[in-house]
Amino acid sequence: MTDQRKLTRRDFLKTAGAGAVTLAAAATARSALAKGPHPGDPGAGNQRWVMVIDLARCDGCGDCTEACTAMHNIPFGQEWIKVYKVEHHAGGEGYFFPRPCMQCDNPPCVNVCPVGASYKREDGVVLIDQDLCIGCRFCIAACPYSARYFESFCRSTQADVAALFESRGMEVARYFFNM
């Protein structure tokens, strides 16, 4: 004889209710984890952003430099990320070493800025507020990694000023914009 248990309506509702509660709890937990505190949010605590570069995979292509240049509106010829080729003296194969801004724990560029244009967010990212910057270049002198530069004009302003100078004589434009 087979032992078949008859499922009552009450047992069905208990099981369905327990399953629904479990699914709701799982969905809520997943949503909370996905939305959880992001670095920079007031509730983020001690979380910090870092950038990890796998030197074994770096082939010196310069994509990181191009991405940084595009993202931060860096003028042509300037770089925040420099890629060095390190040679082995024993005849072994060398490797590439990208050197970006190190996002220092106690950034000297922030400490020397007289107007607070260089600042460090709660999540550890070191940035420059271009609207506050007075162009003193103290941050450039203080950076131990030479990862700072000074751009006297933003790109949109450069185009307007270059057009003005061009209308008055190309030599002036060449002087200001290294054309």
Image (cartoon, rainbow, N blue to C red):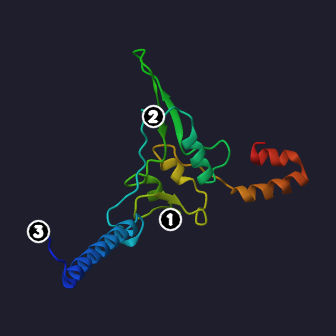
The kind of residue on which mark 1 rests is Gly
In the rendered structure, the answer to whether residue 51 lies left or right of residue 72 reads left
Reading the image, the residue beneath label 3 is: 3
Q: Calculate the distance from the C-alpha at mark 1 to the C-alpha at mark 2.
A: 37 Å
Q: Where's residue 36, x and y in %?
A: 36, 68
Image quadrant of residue 123?
A: bottom left
In the rendered structure, the answer to whether residue 14 lies left or right of residue 166 reads left
Against 91, is 8 above or below?
Answer: below
Q: Residue at x 90, y 54 (%)?
A: 167
Q: Earlier in the sequence, mark 3 or mark 2?
A: 3
Q: Calculate the distance from the C-alpha at mark 3 to the C-alpha at mark 1.
A: 78 Å
Asked if the residue under mark 2 is in contact with the one under mark 1, i.e. CB atoms within 8 Å, the reply is no
Reading the image, the residue beneath label 1 is: 116
Against 6, is 115 above or below?
Answer: above
Q: Where's residue 81, x and y in %?
A: 53, 43
Circle 3 or circle 1, nearest the eye: 3
The kind of residue on which mark 2 rests is Arg
